Image (spheres, grey):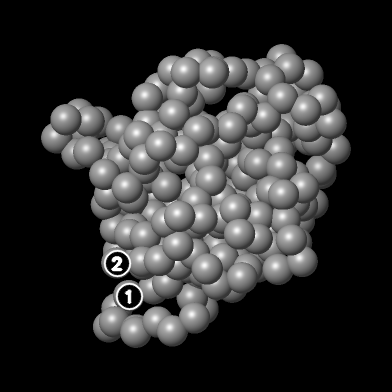
Amino acid sequence: MNMKRKSQMKYWVCGCHNVCLEISCEPIANNTVCFCDDCYNRVRVCESKSSKLGRNQYSRTGGVCMVSVPAKGVKIDQGKEFLGYFRAGLKNEGTEFHPGSKTLNVYAKCCGTLILHIPEAHPRTLQLQPWGLDEWKEEDVSKQMLFDTCYTKITGIMPPAGVPVAKGPVQWGSDGHDSILKVLKSMLVPPNLDPWNKAIEIEFDMLPPPEAYALCGKRIEYIERKEYLF
């Protein structure tokens, strides 16, 4: 892929380099690892969609790595036609799908690489899968922000030794409390004043299946295969 690098810009590319995102802002949190069943599941779904070039993996501790970035600083540089959307939210300790969940997963249909997810709770802060991000490296566990280790009873993934088993942030890491405050602040801005969905060109109706579509004309897939239940 031929990309012209711009000063202070970072780029994210999928496994086959057909999809490229341009990131023009500093991350809110650069090394977050979540152990919840929804995060674990979205990687599992993309693994099943992946080609040999797909770039889907877990953290070295078994959780899911992500980089939190403001939606307004993310732009699709190329490959918009390869974007696919799905929802795979779970409920009742992972035994049922949750069709009412509005969290949206975005992946590259060309190679099956998970790109990011847009959380229902704070949609202006995107959770980017970092493996395709310029110069990103997974930090030592002691420097990572860790979340939702309580889901180990569902996923079977044990948190690192000495890390509490609980819901929410269980270790602040090097990003510290400021990251949480930035996310909370983004949740207080009325949507009409900060149209987050336009920032990444993904607009969709918050409707249950089968009526939910992306306004760009692409259907949002609802995952319903039982092998993704726990």
C-alpha span from label 1 to label 2: 5 Å
Residue 28: name its quadrant: bottom left
Instruction: From the viewer's perspective, tell me whether residue 43 is left or right of residue 221.
Output: right
Q: Which residue is mark 2?
A: 24
In the displayed structure, 36 sits above or below 73; it is above
Q: Which residue is mark 1?
A: 9
Of residues 103 and 143, the one drawn nearer to the viewer in this rendering: 103
Report x, y in % for residue 218.
46, 38
Of helix, strand and loop, which one carries label 1? loop
| Residue 200 in view in this figure | yes
Of residues 34 and 126, the one drawn nearer to the viewer in this rendering: 126
Q: Earlier in the sequence, mark 1 or mark 2?
A: 1
Q: Amino acid at mark 1?
A: Met
Residue with the most extreme left position = 193
Residue 93: name its quadrant: top right
In the displayed structure, 148 sits above or below 20; it is above
Report x, y in % for residue 75.
33, 59
* Structural crowding at the residue carrying mark 2, measured as other residues with C-alpha within 10 Å and reported as few (<14), some (14–19) or many (≥20): some
Q: Residue at x 51, y 55 (%)?
A: 82
Considering the image in quadrants, where does the C terminus appear?
A: top right
Q: Are marks 1 and 2 in contact (CB under 8 Å)?
A: yes
Q: Residue at x 35, y 34 (%)?
A: 215
